[in-house]
Image (cartoon, rainbow, N blue to C red):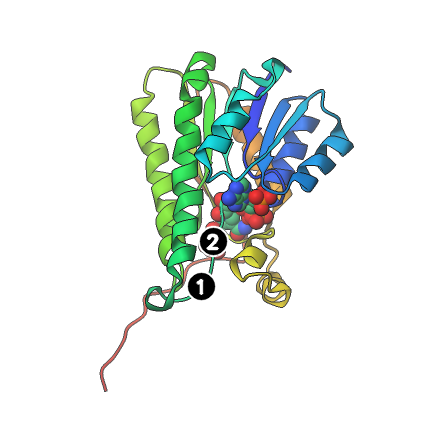
Amino acid sequence: MDKTILITGGTSGFGAAAVERFLRGGWRVVTTGRRAERLQALVDAHGSERLHVAAFDIRDADAMQAALDAIPAEFADIDVLVNNAGLALGTAPAQQADLAQWRQMIDTNVTALVTLTHALLPRLIERRGAILNISSVAATYPYPGGNVYGGTKAFVRQFSLGLRSDLHGTGVRVTSIEPGMAETEFTLVRTGGNRAASDTLYAGAHPITAADLADTLWWLATLPPHLNVNRIEVMPVSQSFAGFQVARED
Ligand code: NDP
Ligand code: 8X3
């Protein structure tokens, strides 16, 4: 297998599982994240022959460009970009939300994602590669407290579809992956480290696992080159939809 994948957010959750899945499948993997010690642990476990790691804050465009420039030649021909790094912060209603948290979500989930995509498009076109963007069911189904998080993921979904249009004829594939409830560090991050809240949310729900989502990414990346999955929505069986809410006057 002579393929290279760049997965952002390889230090945890979906990204970490995807790193393992693609290494197991014989691909070369480039992965990123802020937590250098977790990236080093991946190198300690898997060696550096097929794995290259880069520790930087994805919101820092200069650090991103420096990391791209430092990718060793044997990892430079990137066939698949997985835009996975992202987060939700808070569940407060908009009128009580923290503006700094909103901006961090936009900077990470939107601005960094488009910056990296822009930087890699020439290589991906050259390789007739693929872009796998991690959106969310929150892109489509609003819920109280989802405000800016859902907005960022709707951007990711629509940006993915727009990329499909622009990349028409290049052979580059683009997919918006829209998972529902998955047990990762997502809720720990969202709640500022509230382990009990995270455990309670997932208890008894049989949520999506990081390995499940990594298998979905593997399936998408290894489809025959004439097939494009535009959007894929994946939920645990235990999760479905609730209705509208109505505020009544006394
Ligand atoms: P995790 O919190 O487990 O992983 C998030 C990853 O994103 C980490 O590797 C983290 O690395 C990285 N990341 C976050 N902020 C930054 C930053 N500023 N710079 C660099 N890397 C960053 O959550 P998930 O695995 O669940 O999340 C992965 C993606 O999946 C996200 O985009 C999320 O929105 C999406 N998603 C998650 C769902 C869920 O229910 N879990 C459902 C639908 C979508 P580090 O902290 O080391 O920087
Ligand atoms: C994460 C799924 O439903 O918590 O994107 O927003 S949800």
The reply to whether the C-beta atoms of the residues labelled 1 and 2 are less than 8 Å apart is yes
Name the one closer to the observer, 95 or 2: 95
Q: Which residue is mark 1?
A: 91
**Image point (34%, 35%), residue name:** 159
Q: Distance between the Cα atoms at labels 1 and 2?
A: 8 Å
Name the one closer to the observer, 39 or 232: 39
Name the one closer to the observer, 52 or 78: 52
Circle 1 packing at 10 Å, graded few (<14), some (14-19), many (20+), is some
**Which image quarter: residue 161?**
top left
At label 2, which amino acid type do we have? Ala
- Compared with 158, 48 (above or below) is above
Q: Residue furthest bottom?
A: 250
At label 1, which amino acid type do we have? Thr
Count the numbered circles shown. Answer: 2
Question: Which label number is shown at residue 30?
Answer: none
Rendering coords of residue 244 (x, y %): 32, 66
Q: Which residue is mark 2?
A: 88
Secondary structure beneath label 1: loop
Rendering coords of residue 34 (x, y %): 58, 41
**Image point (64%, 15%), residue name:** 1
Rendering coords of residue 139 (x, y %): 38, 48
Name the one closer to the observer, 222 or 84: 84
**Image point (34%, 28%), residue name:** 163
**Which image quarter: residue 56?**
top right
**Image point (44%, 63%), residue name:** 91
Residue 228 visible here: no
Q: Is mark 2 within 8 Å of ligand 1?
A: yes
